[in-house]
Image: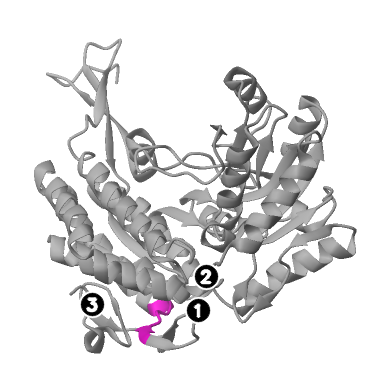
Amino acid sequence: MLLDRPTWQGKFFSSGWVSGEGGDAAVVEPATGAEIGRVGIAGPGDVAAAARAAAAAQASWAAQPHPERAAVLRRAGDLWQANAEEVRDWIVRETGAVPPKGDFEILVATQECYEAAALPSRPYGELLPSLDGRLSMSRRVPAGVVGVISPFNFPLILSIRSVAPALALGNAVLLKPDRRTAVSGGLLLAGIFAQAGLPEGLLHVLPGGPEVGEAVIADPRVRVVSFTGSTRAGRRVGQVAAANLTRAHLELGGNSALVVLDDADLDRAISAGAWGSFNHQGQICMTTGRHLVHESLYDEYVERLAKKADALELGPVIDAGQRDKIHALVTGSVDRGARLAAGGTFSGLFYRPTVLAEVTPEMPAYAEEVFGPVAPVARFGSLEEAAALASGTEYGLSLGIITRDVTKGLALADRIPTGIAHINDQTVNDEANVPFGGVGASGTGARFGGAAANVEAFTETRWVTVRGDVPAYPF
């Protein structure tokens, strides 16, 4: 068992189990409203103490032979599978997910650890030419203490994808999960890495609100911050990080477009579109937030997507605040002339999958990130219009294009600025070995994911030279 509930209630992980100065809070199951545990809430003093402990432990960890660091990550990968039933149960109950979503998070967490296990043995520098007859090289060295701030929607994945490579590369980590998913996004990782043999002091889990996140970012011992969350919050993270010249890797919101061209296989396009918008109740940064459909297919696409939506049963959204935001964007769009083709109602936290037709760019559900099970559908008549519509928001995370002509799809993708593009697929995709990130208001680019991006994200570059003798200087 990863978590012995009588032991962890009212506590958080920081070089062992210690009390949080912020008291404790209920872990609530969105589907029922039931309290399924309690977790300690960190305060700024806890952050400072954790940062001191992390900085003290990091140097000896970085100095470990690379096979030893790799072995910890490999064992962690094995442990996700060995504890899959317990982990799945927490993800399902804490995030309002269906079991296959829990299985997917476990699969990705496993792969993230295995991919990270390969990082310690990668070449960590290169030889450089020098005019002075000396050995000149660049080396990648650990950044030191890394802050990771993760959201509620895919808490395990969006924590482990930064925690695992940061640890593998010789860093210590302060992890601040969303307080609503402190177990799935934090305490489970603490349990796994403790069992995997990670030395004490290297992973500190600090559940809390924005004030705890700001304390993590502002601590001078934290040299790199990896943040996943909303664009609004990401802008604040960037401001706080700038005060200490801390590097901030920002993976932010999205309003991703699925473009359905006139030659698309309509059956496959509708299936892909429904998955892209309704998977995990639309609470995914890459969710298909806008369906742009050629006018020759538009009416049938809307009718069939609405029929599919009416037949689906989804889980709950995370809380009442999120539900009310979703509903306000839907009703605001209907008030401006959108047609409600399906959904638009809720019971408790269960929001019906919703299809909005005749949507135009000025409508709230089109222009803003909904983060809910809503599929706004707009029409276009030409490739030029499709490119303009797809590019017409501040976001630039993911893109899907459905067409039988792959060359045409690639050419269209080149005209739409996004960090991710999929031809003949919807917008929600992720793998542990790929660079991940967006442009514009969706973030600062592919700053982690994949070996090269992870090394860039969680290490610093040092120039080193070696001479046989000290040179003679003019004075």
Dot 3, how many residues are within 10 Å of its Cα: few (below 14), some (14-19), or many (20+)? some
Cα gap from disc 1 to disc 2, whole angstroms: 9 Å
The x, y position of residue 158, in whole percent, is: 42, 56
Cα gap from disc 3 to disc 1, whole angstroms: 21 Å
The answer to whether residue 273 is visible is yes
Q: Where does label 3 land, which residue?
A: 3
Cα gap from disc 3 to disc 2, whole angstroms: 25 Å
The x, y position of residue 237, in whole percent, is: 55, 58
- Amino acid type of the residue tagged 1 in the rendering: Pro
- Amino acid type of the residue tagged 2 in the rendering: Gly
Magenta residues? 37-45
Residue 44 inside the magenta-drawn segment? yes
Residue 184: numbered disc = none
Mark 3 or mark 1: name the one nearer the start of the chain: 3
Residue 315: numbered disc = 2
Q: Where does label 1 land, which residue?
A: 30
Dot 2, how many residues are within 10 Å of its Cα: few (below 14), some (14-19), or many (20+)? many
Picture quarter containing residue 163? bottom left
- Front-most of residues 56 and 449: 449
